[in-house]
Image (cartoon, grey):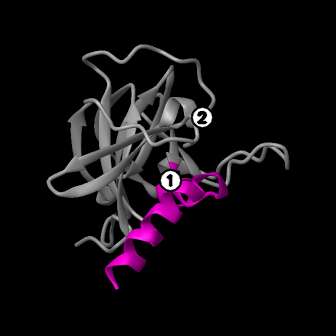
Amino acid sequence: MENKTGKTVESGIQEFLTFTLGKAEYGIDILKVQEIRGYDSVTRIANAPEFHKGVINLRGVIVPIIDMRVKFGLEHVAYDQFTVVIIINALGRVIGMVVDGVSDVVSLREEQIKPPPEFGAGLDTEYITGIGTSNDQMLILTDIERLMGGADMQLVENRSNADNNSAV
């Protein structure tokens, strides 16, 4: 039986969707993932931060698309047939994340997850929940709600609030 955090209560196992950005592997709670799609063109929003690629219409829902390479300060690469968009449900809304590729769904036991390293005040790593190890591979486990709810994501939050207020 699973609880709302994706943890299997009896066995202490948590499942993560793993994806790549550059040479690093990241993991997000599988229960936050709605679907995985190939990258398609987006409608750019004027004056948006560089990591905000634009929006798409996903079956009648306007979804902001965030380029995680740009968000994490990685070098730009051309999108190709392996570039995907992970559609997630976070903070009560639907958001798309552009990543280099999706790897797998990994199940980790509690003892396979170590606390995140401490880097000091100059580096924002509050969204890292831990480092998972599986088959000699390290995964950076992320709290996608903390990451998407960060102060620099204010544009996404304001857009959703404006939509909610206009519906009242």
Residue 97 showing in the rendered view? yes
Label tally: 2
Give residue 135's quadrant in the image. Answer: top left
> Considering only order in the chain, which callout, 2 or 1, is on the residue closer to the N terminus?
2
Q: Which mark is residue 111?
A: 1
Percent x, y for residue 19? 38, 34
Disc 2 target residue? 72
Q: Please state which of the two labelled residues, at mark 1 or mark 2, is closer to the viewer.
A: 2
Give residue 109's quadrant in the image. Answer: bottom left
Residue that appears at 63% across and 29% down: 73
The reply to whether the magenta stretch includes residue 123 is no
Residue that appears at 36% across and 18% down: 79
Percent x, y for residue 53? 44, 36
Q: With 163 as the anchor, is 149 left or right in this view?
A: right
Relative to 152, does residue 159 appear above or below in the rendering?
below
Residue 91 showing in the rendered view? no
Percent x, y for residue 24? 51, 27
Range of residues picked out in magenta: 142-168
The reply to whether the magenta stretch includes residue 151 is yes
Q: Amino acid at mark 2?
A: Phe
Residue that appears at 34% across and 86% down: 168
Q: Amino acid at mark 1?
A: Glu
Element class at badge 2: loop
> Farthest right residue?
121
Q: With 37 as the anchor, is 22 left or right in this view?
A: right
Q: Which mark is residue 124?
A: none
Residue that appears at 51% across and 63% down: 157
Q: With 112 as the anchor, is 6 left or right in this view?
A: left
